[in-house]
Amino acid sequence: MEIKRLRKKLNLTQVEFGKIINKSHATIRKYESGEIEVPGNIKELLRLKYPQHFSTEKLQVTVLEPGENYTNFKKELHHKTLEVERLLERNAELMKINGLQARNIELLEEQIQLYKDRLKNYEGKTAS
């Protein structure tokens, strides 16, 4: 999968594309340069979200012979559809969690910077 090709087809910047898949600009840059591999869940998300931009793989076609049970086939297809829907829901949940984790990291980094600033201020006062 070529992330850069897809991003350009969608006419998006790396920042805009990153927001769609909940990744930073730096991560998108690394995906595009090949520095890091695009995780499977991101690939699947993009295939599902933008199927028109992916070459279709050979589909497995089941041909029912006379006398085969169409009802069983229909049930199996229904179960597979439900499984895909559950996976999509789980992926959405994980993306939400990733977004919350990213925000928590930002808040922690802000707190660390505040503590560093306070420490510098305190050291400056004690040195005087």
Image (cartoon, helix red, strand yellow):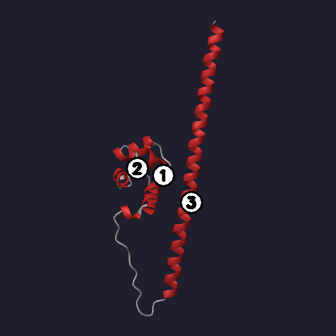
Give the Cα distance between marks 1 and 2.
Answer: 10 Å
How far from the left and from the top, in percent, is residue 52?
A: 38, 64
Residue nearest the viewer, comparing 98 with 75:
98
> Which residue does the image show at 53% across and 81% down from the upper left?
75
Q: Nearer the viewer, mark 3 or mark 2?
A: 2
Q: Amino acid at mark 1?
A: Ile
Foreground tag (1 vs 2): 2
Q: Which residue is mark 3?
A: 90
Look at the image and tell me in which quarter the N terminus lies.
Answer: bottom left
Q: Which mark is residue 12?
A: 2
Dividing the picture into quadrants, the one containing residue 51 is bottom left
Give the quarter of the image for residue 94. Answer: bottom right
Q: CA distance from mark 3 to mark 2?
A: 26 Å
The picture places residue 86, in percent across and down from the top left corner, at 56, 65
Q: Nearer the viewer, residue 35 or 88?
A: 88
Q: Position of residue 123 (x, y in %)?
A: 63, 13
Label 3 crowd (10 A; few <14 / some 14-19 / many >=20) = few
**Which residue is drawn at the image coordinates 61% and 35% (left, top)?**
108
Q: Position of residue 41 (x, y in %)?
A: 47, 56
- The amino acid type found where label 3 is placed reads Arg
Label 2 sits on a secondary structure element that is loop
Q: Which residue is mark 1?
A: 20
